[in-house]
Amino acid sequence: MSRILHALDQNAERWALLVFYVMIVLTMFIEVVRREVFAYSSIWGEEIVRYSFIYLAWIGAAAAVKERGHIRIDVLMHYAGPQAKALLYIFGDLVMLAVAVVAVYYSMETVLVSAKFGSVTHGLRISQVWFLLAVPVGFTLVIIRLIQSLLRDLRDLRNGNAVYEGDKLFD
């Protein structure tokens, strides 16, 4: 069981991102072929691509938080010592955690209203709740990754280790 949880911790977002990315590419390919070869297109194809992209974005945000690959202004980090750098990362994660908790709360209101009134999508004719859940699910994953990041940073600060800065996107 521990190995399964470790594998999920390491790769859950990657697998989910792969699934949604493949879904987008395959659906777009099918829709292009249908439109160009058969002169027919469907409304459901566009909806699958749109909602897959929304899930892709929110799950990708959680993956970026995990790897510290999200956009940030780190000019101060170049001049800060290891302890100050750790404190700045902890402060940033706490602010982001507060924003994520507020976002989960308010996005769940939208989901609950949609469930109450039974709204459905235009093309797929399934409950819109499944697609509106992308925001609270994504922010919940962000919260989980932020808590992991905070615990890692606090451990590094206590042990005097250099704080994890993530991989550089550009040099």
Image (cartoon, rainbow, N blue to C red):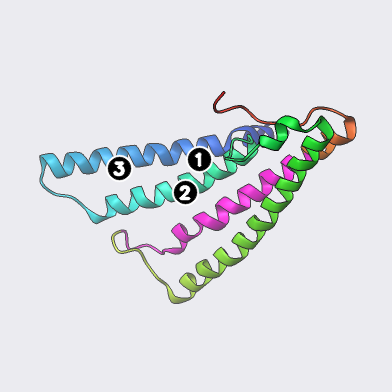
Tag 1: residue type? Ala
Mark 1, other Cα within 10 Å: few <14 / some 14–19 / many ≥20: some
Q: Main secondary structure of the magenta part?
A: helix
Image location of residue 147, percent across then percent down: 73, 46
> In terms of image quadrants, where is residue 125?
bottom left
- Crowdedness near tag 3: few (<14), some (14–19) or many (≥20) residues, C-alpha within 10 Å: some
Q: Which residues are magenta?
A: 124-151
- In magenta segment, residue 146: yes
Q: Residue beneath label 3, please?
A: 27
The residue depicted at 71 percent of the width and 46 percent of the height is 92
**Disc with the residue nearer the chain's start (2 vs 1):** 1
Q: Is residue 28 above or below residue 119?
A: above
In the displayed structure image, the side of residue 8 where residue 86 appears, left or right: right
In the rendered view, does 13 fall on the left or right side of 19? right
Quadrant assignment, res 9: top right
Q: Earlier in the sequence, mark 3 or mark 2?
A: 3
Measured in 3D between alpha carbons, the distance from the residue under mark 3 to the one under mark 1, in whole angstroms, is: 16 Å
Instruction: State the SS at label 3.
Output: helix
Q: Label 1: which residue?
A: 16
Tell me if mark 2 has few (under 14), some (14-19) or many (20+) residues whose alpha carbon lies within 10 angstroms of its own. Answer: many
For label 2, the SS is helix
Quarter placement of the N terminus = top right
Q: Position of residue 166 (x, y in %)?
A: 65, 30
Q: Which mark, by number, is residue 55?
A: 2
- Disc 3 and disc 1 in contact, CB within 8 angstroms: no
The residue lying toward the viewer, choosing from 157 and 132, is: 157
Verify whether residue 120 appears in magenta.
no
Name the residue: 49% across, 75% down: 116
Q: Please, what secondary structure does the residue beneath circle 1 have?
A: helix
In this view, 54 is above or below 109: above
Q: Which amino acid does the dot numbered 2 rest on?
A: Tyr
